[in-house]
Amino acid sequence: MSSSQGGGDSKLFARGKVAELRLELNGGGKKDKNFTQKKIALKKIVANMTMSNNEMVSLFPDIIACMHIQSLEIKKMCFLFLVNYSRMRPEIAVKAIPYLQHDMEDPNPLVRALALRTMSYVHVKEFVEATVPLVKRLLRDSDPYVRKTAAFCVAKLYDHDKYMVEQSDLIDRLNQLLRDDNPTVVASALAGLMDIWERSDSIKLTIDYSNASKMVAILPDCSEWGQTYILEALMSYVPQESGEATLLAERIAPRLSHSNSSVVLTCIRVILYLMNYIADEKQVSALCRKLSPPLVTLLAKGPEVQYLALRNALLILQRRPDVLRNDIRVFFCKYNDPIYVKVTKLELIFMLANEKNIDEVLTELREYATEVDVHFVRKAVRAIGKLAIKIEPAARRCINLLLELVATKVPYIVQEATVVIRNIFRKYPNQYESIIGTLCEHLDSLDEPEAKAAMVWVIGQYAARIENSDVLLEDFLYSFAEEPVEVQLALLTATVKLFIQRPTKGQDLVPKVLKWATEETDNPDLRDRAYMYWRLLSTDMNAAKQMVMGEKPPITAESEKLDPMTLEEMCLNVGTLATIYLKPVQTVFRSARPRRLPDSPALQKHTLPTASNLPAFETQKSLSAFGMGGQATALRPVDTQLAAAAGIGGMAGMAGVNASPSPSPHPSASDDNMASAVSDADAYFAGIGSQQMAAMGIHDDTPFSGGGGGAEASYVVNQYAPQQVFQPAQGVGSNGDLLIL
């Protein structure tokens, strides 16, 4: 029966003519006692309206004439038409107001609620003004369904006209609705108040422990929507004592076993929020253990919900590593998982991997590396390399697995392995160089820029250990002009490294590469770096060696972590769309109110992500002005000499990091110093420097053009700029109201 009805409904979606539909709508007469013909005609009109057939607006007077018919089905279609076309023809729409006002006196609560909802949805001045007294009356209606609808209508009216609602007593009446006997009405009033608070700059939201406790008490009696509204509202409660936060978290914890994923994720968000105010570490650990099972249970749902749960798990693990600590097996990929789920699971496996489970993880990753999905295989190989950097005792096992995968000679596996092995060499210098020979056997497999750049880096860095390093580099240099900038920068640096380590092998290559990079390229990064190397080499070979082959900053596998400010904000938005992107809320929703942890005597500030602005691995970096750019306050004598000779001030060069120098407080003095440095450099090159350049076979009359260093893929530097913290107003209204004007 349903299939035949579905087939009949599909016939309604045919583009109709206004005249024909008007005849059908006004036909039937007295014989059509059940209004069957009118219903069919209205269905056709609504179908055409859905197909954006704006000719239907001509039927407005005929639709209004049908509103008096005592049929809920007909009223729904007429009201839908009214909401859709009222802004196009407001002069006709206002004629529907008497019918709607009459319906609000109807004995059927469904009709009263439908009429009120329709009236509040129409964004026409006359409708908005007429709705206010009606909402006031229906907020005290005898039926809870009508009161619930009226609560939402207050928020809708606020969206239409903020000033009018603030001048009326609608917000006070909505506050009073929080004392209603029906849990659904209370939840709806809370939802309305929260919506108004989100949109307002002049209204403050205050929830004390007494109000919060009452909300939690009615949770079991609410629908899943109502529970979500209440849990959302609890995010505005600021615990003043650690005991309050602990008790409230324990009371809402049973919602973690709810069948609705929205309720579960919102409950997780509230518990994570309350943990910031709990002093007892044992209580925090106990709550962390309670958060693991619901997250694991969500993985049994559909792929979309799985993905949402996984993205939130990535966020939660950064803030509370104890959650899911022993549940790594549940994140192992299934053969039929969508690729977006597999990739996210891979990230979680990496985060949960440790010395105890590394063998199990590597066995799993070996399986992933043999799958048919190329994108996933690449991610798996990269994860193996990152684990070698993260877990030092397991580095040898990870490298052996990478070599095993390289032996398959699958091109994309070889290329990914080359990239991650480059990073392993940087993490563990002078430890695993014995595998360089294996990499050199697969040079023909490299055709991607990142892989080529990685291999060129290895050849340049270990030119003294690779017997035929000059031949290998020369092979890459045959296509120098056609290579992407990333590879050209790597080749330029590698050639200079070869010359420094083995001058006899590199003396023929360096002049050619420097000439190409300065005369035959349009890329400013490449050209500027070539000029810098040129002048370094012609100034002092020992200083050049000290800089080019100097110690590099340490790298870490944790560079993808969120910065503390973003992490703190994201934990207050668990379960929302922002957590899918792992971006600040205002990046995803421009009009969203930024969230920060409100201050309180119970706030455990020493446990917050923002307790220290920089992670330990960054504070340990010791970078000269040439390594980090712009900070030339503590230059060594040799650095000062090179800066003056090259005329580059605090330009970032050797480590391949783009410089972002701070603006000088005395621009004129800075400009004079720069001009003086350039003049000194030109004078130098006109004299002694030209003799050394001639000895290298370098002849160039092109004037030096200053600029920024290139960006060779090397290490990640995160910057944590302080941001203004949003603090919701404290204090509680004497009358127990949540929203106060």
Image (tube, helix red, strand yellow):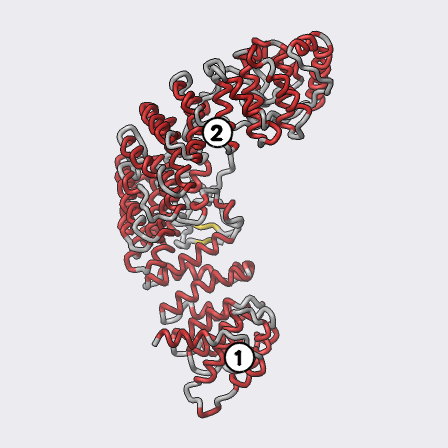
Relative horizontal placement of residue 685, taking residue 312 as reference (left or right): right
User: In whole angstroms, how far apart are the C-alphas of marks 2 and 1?
Assistant: 74 Å
x and y, in percent, of residue 544 in the image: 57, 13
Disc ID at residue 674: none
Regarding mark 1 in the picture, which secondary structure is present there?
Answer: helix
x and y, in percent, of residue 262 in the image: 36, 53
Q: Earlier in the sequence, mark 2 or mark 1?
A: 1
For residue 368, above or below residue 623: below
Look at discs 2 and 1 and give the one toward the viewer.
2
Name the residue nearer the viewer: 699 or 89: 699
x and y, in percent, of residue 555 in the image: 44, 25
Label 2 neighbourhood size at 10 Å, few (<14), some (14-19), many (20+)? Answer: few
What amino acid is at disc 1? Answer: Ile
Q: Label 2: which residue? A: 444
Name the residue nearer the viewer: 33 or 119: 33
- The residue located at (44%, 89%) in the rendering is 32
Total labels drawn: 2
x and y, in percent, of residue 119 in the image: 50, 70
- The residue located at (42%, 89%) in the rendering is 33
Residue 650 position by quadrant: top right
Name the residue nearer the viewer: 278 or 65: 65
For residue 554, above or below residue 351: above
Q: Is residue 553 visible?
A: yes
Residue 288 position by quadrant: top left
What amino acid is at disc 2? Answer: Asp
Label 1 neighbourhood size at 10 Å, few (<14), some (14-19), many (20+)? Answer: many
Relative horizontal placement of residue 438, taking residue 671 as reference (left or right): left
Name the residue nearer the viewer: 701 or 111: 701
For residue 223, above or below residue 495: below
- The residue located at (40%, 57%) in the rendering is 190
Q: Label 1: which residue? A: 63
- The residue located at (41%, 37%) in the rendering is 379
